Image: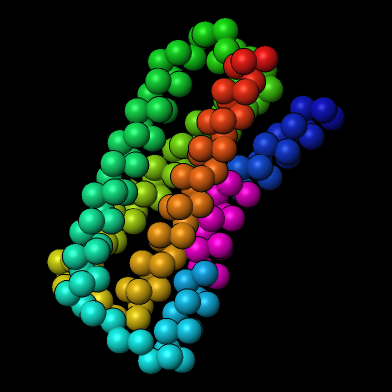
Amino acid sequence: MIIMKNKVKHLSRRSFLTFSPIVFGMIVAYILCNEMKIKNVAIDRVNMVEVSKVLIGIWGTLLGFLMTAESILVAFSNGTITNEFKKTGHYMTVIFQYTQTSIKLLVCILIFICIIAINEFKMCEMYMFICFMTMTFSDVLISLVILILMLRMANN
C-alpha cells in the first residue's frame, strides 16, 4: 500500500513537472498574441528570425549544461549523497526533470531551425516563440529549484 502511494506521488510530481511549463507557456503565449492582434502589432520577420538564431544558441547551451549535469549525476550514482536522494525517490525525479527538459529543448531547437529555414515569422511562429520561451524558462527555473533543494539535502 505504501509503495503504491509513493508511485502515485512520484507519478503526479513528474506529470506536474512535465505539463505545468507547457500549459503555462501556452497560456502566456495566447494572452500575449491576443494582445498583439488587438493592438495590430506588426511582426518584423527579419528581426524575429535573427532573434530566433540567438535563441537556438541559448537553447543549445542550456541543453549542453543539462546533459552534463545529468551525466555527472549518473556517473556518481553510487555516492553517499546520491544514495540519500535514491532513498527519498528524488534521484529519479531529478533525472526525469533534466531528461524531459532536454527533450523539450531539443524539440524547440529543431522547430526553430525549420522556421529559420522557411524564413517566415507570422503570428503562429510568434505564438510558438513566446510559448517555447516561457516553457523553457519555467523548466530551467524548476531545474534550478531542484538543484538548490539537492544542495540543501546534501548539506544536512
**Does residue 150 appear in this view?**
yes
Above or below, 89 relative to 55:
above
Q: Is residue 20 magenta?
A: yes
What residue is rendered at 40% in x and 73% in y?
A: 127
Quarter of the figure with the C terminus: top right
Instruction: State the residue in front, 139 or 10.
Output: 139
**Does residue 86 appear in this view?**
no
What residue is rendered at 63% in x and 49% in y?
A: 16
Above or below, 10 relative to 115:
above
Q: x, y (%) of residue 81? A: 57, 12
Quarter of the figure with the N terminus: top right
Q: x, y (%) of residue 114? A: 21, 64
Q: x, y (%) of residue 142? A: 54, 43
Q: x, y (%) of residue 33? A: 44, 80
Q: Is residue 127 magenta?
A: no
Highlighted range, magenta: 16-27
Residue 92 placement: quadrant: top right
What residue is rendered at 52% in x and 8% in y?
A: 79
What residue is rendered at 61% in x and 48% in y?
A: 15
Position of residue 107 in the picture relative to residue 45 (left or right)? right
